[in-house]
């Protein structure tokens, strides 16, 4: 196994640092950019921003380049929307900033926001989870598995 594979596993997303400007910047935090911009700060919540992004993508012409900038919990749902709207990977730039991420619990099959901690308690089923360095682009989430596989629900049962 190469050194780069051990420092950055294949299953963890890589974020490009492209210098080409995007036509549309969708950002979690306000940004001083000359590019057309949709910022979470300008909307009531993430759903309202997502509706605005969808409306903008419906008007898009072929070749639109979109940059999605924010933490992983913010950018991956937007990436899925952009892909569903017909953009391909070359037209979407993901600019990651540290913050929240989504974790998928394999025990209850639900996602939840999490920080960067290696463990957490599932907010839905109460199982103590270890967050693996495996990322699902389809779900936009890291894999959370039970810390004690011999007694997965021992922490939540009397």
Image: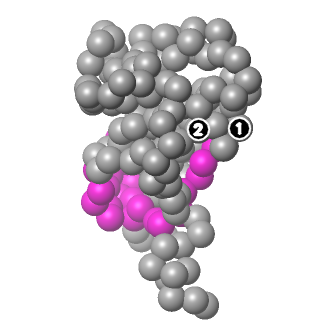
Position of 31 with respect to 91 (left or right) is left
* Image quadrant assignment for residue 42: top left
The relative height of residue 63 versus residue 56 in the rendered view (above or below) is below
For the question of whether residue 77 can be seen, the reply is no
The magenta segment:
115-138
Q: Nearer the viewer, residue 29 or 138?
A: 29
Image coordinates for residue 60, horizontal then vertical, percent:
65, 15
What residue is disc 2 on?
Answer: 92
User: Do labels 2 and 1 touch, CB within 8 Å?
Assistant: yes
Q: Residue at x 41, y 62 (%)?
A: 131
* Image quadrant assignment for residue 25: top left
Q: Nearer the viewer, residue 25 or 21?
A: 21
Q: Residue at x 34, y 15 (%)?
A: 45
Number of other residues with Cα within 10 Å of mark 2, as a class: few under 14, some 14 to 19, many 20 or more: some
Q: CA distance from mark 2 to mark 1?
A: 7 Å
Please check the rendered image and state whether residue 134 is part of the magenta-colored stretch, yes or no.
yes
């Amino acid at each position: 196994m190469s050194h780069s594979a051990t420092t950055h596993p294949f299953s963890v997303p890589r974020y490009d640092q492209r210098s080409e400007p995007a036509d549309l910047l969708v950002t979690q935090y306000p940004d001083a950019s000359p590019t057309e911009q949709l910022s979470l700060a300008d909307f009531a919540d993430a759903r309202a921003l997502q509706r605005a992004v969808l409306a903008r993508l419906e008007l898009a012409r072929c070749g639109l380049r979109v940059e999605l900038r924010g933490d992983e919990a913010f950018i991956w749902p937007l990436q899925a929307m952009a892909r569903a709207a017909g953009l391909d990977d070359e037209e979407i730039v993901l600019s990651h900033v540290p913050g929240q991420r989504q974790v998928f619990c394999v025990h209850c099959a639900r996602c939840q926001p999490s920080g960067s901690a290696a463990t957490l308690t599932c907010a839905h089923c109460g199982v103590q989870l270890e967050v693996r360095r495996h990322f699902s682009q389809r779900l936009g989430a890291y894999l959370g598995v039970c810390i004690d596989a011999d007694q997965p629900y021992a922490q939540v049962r009397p």
